Image (cartoon, grey):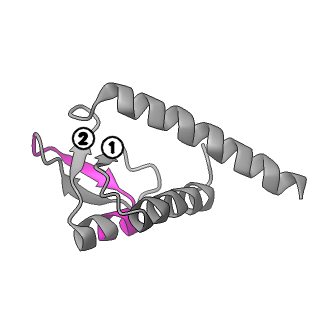
Amino acid sequence: MLPKEVFDEYSKKYMKELLEKGHLPTVIGGFIDYFGDAKTVDCVVCGTPVFLRPWLAQIVQDRNLRVQCICCADPQEVKSRIIMDSAKIEAEVKSEKAK
């Protein structure tokens, strides 16, 4: 599992880029609080509480973004996002280690 700092750094950078471009993404929440400090938000489709990182929950609240649980989200979108994010994070970690 990635350290919380690496995960957060990448995710914050990605979210900032989306918001700066004017995108208002639907946030996908999970059912597991990996780091023990998550905030809960209800899925807009089914109402199930899901976990979000605290900083992301704040952005969701401030920007009034939609949150869906993993079950209600488009499975292809989730799968492709996980694959792309994992590859980018891995590349960034390797790049940092090479410095």
Say few, some or many: other residues with alpha carbon within 10 Å of mark 1 (under 14 / 14 to 19 / 20 or more). some
Residue placed farthest to the front in the image?
A: 21
| Rendered-image quadrant of the N terminus | top right
User: Mark 1 — residue?
Assistant: 30
User: Mark 2 — residue?
Assistant: 69
**Horizontally, is 93 left or right of 10 in the view?**
right
Residue 31: give x, y in percent of width and height.
31, 42
Q: Nearer the viewer, residue 17 or 10?
A: 17
Residue bounds of the magenta highlight = 46-58
Is 86 one of the magenta-colored residues? no
Residue placed farthest to the left in the image?
A: 46
Q: Residue at x 26, y 35 (%)?
A: 73
Circle 1 — which element?
A: loop
**Horizontally, is 89 left or right of 12 in the view?**
right
Residue type pointed to by label 1? Gly
Q: How many marks?
A: 2
Say few, some or many: other residues with alpha carbon within 10 Å of mark 2 (under 14 / 14 to 19 / 20 or more). many
| Rendered-image quadrant of the C terminus | bottom right
Q: Which mark, residue 19?
A: none
Residue 75: give x, y in percent of width and height.
32, 27
Q: Residue at x 36, y 59 (%)?
A: 38
Circle 2 — which element?
A: strand
Q: Residue at x 59, y 39 (%)?
A: 86
Q: Nearer the viewer, residue 69 or 73?
A: 73
Q: Are marks 2 and 1 in contact (CB under 8 Å)?
A: yes
Residue 33: give x, y in percent of width and height.
38, 50
Q: Nearer the viewer, residue 20 or 83?
A: 20
Along the polypeptide, which appears first: circle 2 or circle 1?
1
Cα separation, mark 2 vs mark 1, equals 6 Å
Residue type pointed to by label 2? Cys
